[in-house]
């Protein structure tokens, strides 16, 4: 089945890594594996369309070009990935209506508070209209489904757990031996973290983590930190880690996603607080490699980490609880291993993209009349 595909926030081949891009790529790969051919109908970026008038004319041309592309591909359905007030879909509803095909949004987000601000009111309204036009809106966050129920009837909503390819992050004993040798960490436990070094909640989370690890270092806990990631705040974060963890912090820079499995395999605990984290695909990746997670019970983290089974989630307003949680795992090898085994099984049972998005593929086929 041919499906027209559009990602209004940014194309899936955009060079900047992000959780949003990762989720979109996993979705696209899984649908392709299910025999669905995705044709990119448009590469138009609608980010902040509502307050960038110069983009409005571009959007009109993009709509016509998307209609032609979807028509040439004989698309049986239009699928939009990640639409919300910052990047509303002004293309999909038009193309679907002109071609008389179903319109589906994956990871649609609806937030009524955006209608109260002048800067976001137009984006809110454009997004609302697109969601109302959809035959189905699917989300990978339960909170988003709850919010969407204020706009759409339950029968036009769906929930799909986020998924990855677990085998892409399977534990690699050879990589563990080689990387730990390169890092010179010996037998001491290694805390791994991975994030973009952006000047936002990512850097806030890393700052929170480094300060908590500094407390453990000063208390005499023996461990090493390995951080994968890069970005504008790298110098600031490196300086903080040097201060808090002198001689114990290793910065790898940006690691290609296909090599992250090796990095996780060489660690013992995955720690990233995840302040206001939407979901956090790195949690699934680390767990697939057998790492227990320590994070905050904030945002959507609880949807990808089983608290008390595959990791420990602590209250966002309790830094001491986070420090204790990391310390508990660093000091108990058997508990780490048990949680790591549970984490591997959890990802394969609940977050395998082939299973989760395979169900979605079946739904899309039925909507298009091919089920």
Image (cartoon, rainbow, N blue to C red):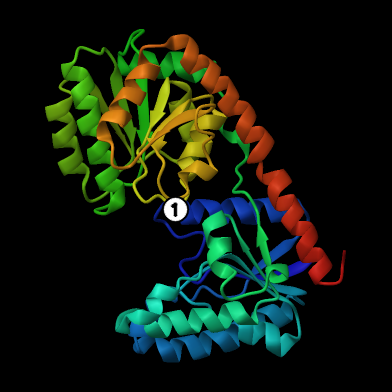
Which residue lies at the image location 36% right of the left edge and 36% below the top edge? 272
Residue in the foreground of this view, choosing between 46 and 184: 46
**Label 1 Cα neighbours within 10 Å, binned few <14 / some 14-19 / many ≥20:** some
Name the foreground residue: 86 vs 232.
86
Q: What residue lies at 40% left-to-right and 49% top-to-bottom?
A: 277
Asked whether residue 213 appears in the rendered view, the answer is: yes
Does 363 appear above or below 335? below
Front in this rendered view, residue 50 or 10 = 50
Residue at x-position 46% and y-position 40%: 282
Position of residue 122 relative to residue 177, above or below, is below
Q: Classify residue 330 as left or right of residue 132.
A: left
Q: Position of residue 295 (x, y in %)?
A: 39, 36
Decide if residue 230 is on the left or right side of residue 43.
left
Question: Circle 1 sits in a helix, a strand or a loop, which is it?
Answer: loop
Instruction: Locate residue 305, reporting x and y percent.
Output: 51, 37
Q: Which residue shows up at 70% across the image and 89% down it?
A: 98
Relative image position of residue 301 (x, y in whole percent): 46, 44
Residue, disc 1 = 278
Outermost residue toward the top? 187
Question: Where, quadrant-wise, is the N terminus in this rendering?
Answer: bottom right
């Amino acid at each position: 089945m041919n499906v027209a595909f559009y990602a209004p926030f940014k194309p899936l081949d955009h060079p900047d890594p992000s959780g949003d891009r990762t989720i979109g790529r996993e979705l696209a790969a899984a649908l392709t594996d299910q025999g669905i051919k995705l044709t990119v109908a448009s590469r138009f970026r609608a980010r902040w369309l509502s307050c960038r008038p110069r983009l409005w004319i571009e959007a009109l041309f993009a709509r016509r070009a998307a209609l032609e592309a979807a028509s040439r591909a004989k698309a049986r359905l239009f699928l939009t990935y990640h639409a919300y007030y910052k990047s509303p879909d002004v293309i999909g509803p038009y193309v679907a209506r002109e071609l008389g095909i179903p319109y589906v949004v994956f990871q649609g987000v609806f937030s009524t508070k955006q209608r109260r601000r002048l800067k976001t009111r137009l984006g809110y309204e454009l997004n609302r209209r697109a969601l109302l036009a959809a035959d189905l809106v699917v989300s990978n966050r339960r909170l988003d489904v709850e919010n969407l129920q204020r706009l759409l009837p339950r029968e036009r909503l769906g929930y799909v757990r986020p998924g990855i390819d677990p085998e892409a992050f399977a534990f690699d004993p050879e990589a563990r031996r080689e990387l730990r040798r390169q890092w010179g960490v010996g037998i001491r436990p290694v805390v791994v973290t991975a994030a973009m070094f952006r000047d936002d909640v990512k850097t806030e989370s890393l700052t929170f983590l480094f300060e908590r690890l500094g407390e453990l270092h000063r208390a005499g806990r023996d461990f090493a930190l390995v951080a994968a990631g890069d970005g504008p705040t790298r110098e600031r974060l490196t300086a903080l880690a040097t201060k808090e963890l002198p001689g114990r912090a290793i910065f790898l820079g940006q690691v290609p996603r296909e090599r992250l499995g090796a990095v996780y395999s060489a660690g013992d605990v995955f720690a990233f607080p995840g302040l206001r984290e939407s979901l956090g695909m790195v949690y699934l990746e680390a767990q697939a490699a057998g790492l227990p997670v320590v994070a905050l019970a904030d945002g959507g983290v609880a949807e990808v980490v089983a608290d008390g089974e595959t990791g420990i989630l602590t209250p966002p307003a309790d830094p001491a609880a986070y420090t204790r949680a990391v310390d508990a795992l660093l000091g108990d090898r058997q508990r780490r291993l048990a949680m790591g085994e549970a984490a591997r099984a959890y990802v394969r049972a609940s977050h395998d993209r082939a299973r989760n998005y395979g169900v979605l593929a079946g739904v899309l086929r039925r909507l298009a009349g091919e089920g």
